[in-house]
């Protein structure tokens, strides 16, 4: 698909308006919103990530790319949320302390809302208390944590240990995700499940709710 290749370039160059236009065109062509999200936006961000890792792109460029991606996601959000399904559970979700990456978390939140969950977004850089206070106040079923850095993912264990110390670990389903995590890590820190991507997060949340 020529347009998707063009969108990869536009995302790389941080061209927000072009990304918004590309998303609209793909939708007009009949692409389902989830396909636009995964193939055009997440696909493009993967390329950005590789060149960021290799020192070809730097933080300012990657921020522009992230901003362009968010522009596209904003168009898709209402479409992904259009299921009209009854609320099947409530989740508080946030990125852990020390970590400001929020695109993956936002995506998970969007998909969860689309699947009929109520979502409370705690934003970025959350200490254990932020998760726990909110989970209590909101009477949440699920605590979702996101981390994109190998240096911040251990903090997830701090949150779970705090739940244990307060004697409320089993009151919540704890789901974790983020690029550097894996199944093994999820088990090791005592999470209920590791979710590879947003679609898996939705499936897993549904499974645990029943
Ligand atoms: Co950052 N960064 N970054 N960055 N950045 C990474 C993560 C990195 C892998 C890049 C690289 O080197 N290849 C690397 C981490 C290396 C490591 O830890 N081993 C890195 C680094 C090093 C850094 C800085 C330290 C750079 C610096 O300053 N020197 C710095 C850290 C700042 C901080 O957090 N304290 C930094 C900063 C930034 C920007 C601000 C420029 C920007 C973030 C903008 C924003 O989020 N608003 C940024 C970006 C954009 C990235 C990359 C390129 C893309 C991340 C992304 O949005 N992916 C990233 C490289 C990469 O991952 N390829 C990188 C798209 C997103 C849809 O995927 O977040 O994986 P992801 O989410 C997926 C799944 O993981 C899962 O579902 C999502 C959807 O399918 N998931 C969950 C995620 N969270 C979940 C929670 C759940 C369930 C599933 O809960 C239930």
Image (cartoon, rainbow, N blue to C red):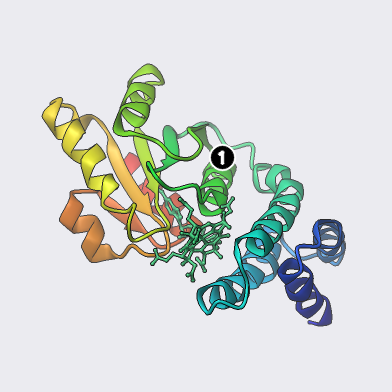
Q: Pick the residue in front: 15 or 184.
A: 15
- Residue 130 seen by the camera: yes
16, above or below 45, in the image: above
Mark 1 lies on residue: 113
The image quadrant that residue 169 belongs to is top left
User: Residue drawn at (41%, 21%), measured in percent from left and top?
Assistant: 138
User: Residue drawn at (66%, 61%), measured in percent from left and top?
Assistant: 37
Residue 30 location (% of width, % of height): 81, 64
Report the quarter where the C terminus lies: top left
Residue 10 location (% of width, % of height): 79, 69
Please give left or right for residue 49 compared with residue 36 in the image: left
Residue 13 location (% of width, % of height): 76, 69
User: Is the residue marked 1 within 8 Å of ligand 1, measured from its CB?
Assistant: no
Please give left or right for residue 146 compared with residue 6 in the image: left
Report the quarter where the N terminus lies: bottom right
User: Residue drawn at (25%, 38%), measured in percent from left and top?
Assistant: 159
- Mark 1: secondary structure: helix
The image quadrant that residue 115 belongs to is top right
């Amino acid at each position: 698909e020529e347009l998707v290749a063009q969108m990869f370039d536009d995302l790389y160059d941080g061209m927000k308006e072009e990304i918004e236009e590309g998303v609209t065109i793909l939708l007009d062509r009949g692409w389902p919103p989830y396909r636009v999200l995964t193939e055009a936006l997440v696909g493009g961000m993967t390329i950005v990530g590789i060149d960021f890792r290799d020192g070809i792109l730097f933080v300012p460029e990657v921020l522009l790319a992230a901003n362009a991606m968010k522009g596209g996601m904003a168009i898709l959000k209402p479409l992904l949320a259009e299921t009209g399904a009854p609320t099947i559970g409530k989740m508080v979700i946030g990125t852990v302390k020390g970590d400001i990456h929020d695109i993956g978390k936002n995506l998970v939140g969007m998909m969860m809302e689309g699947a009929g969950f109520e979502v409370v977004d705690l934003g970025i850089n959350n200490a254990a208390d932020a998760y726990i206070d909110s989970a209590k106040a909101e009477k949440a079923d699920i605590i979702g944590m996101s981390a994109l850095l190998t240096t911040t993912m251990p903090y997830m264990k701090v949150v779970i240990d705090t739940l244990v110390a307060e004697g409320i670990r089993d009151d919540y389903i704890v789901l974790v995700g983020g690029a550097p995590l894996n199944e093994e890590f999820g088990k090791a820190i005592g999470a209920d499940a590791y979710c590879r991507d947003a679609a898996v997060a939705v499936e897993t949340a549904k499974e645990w709710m029943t």
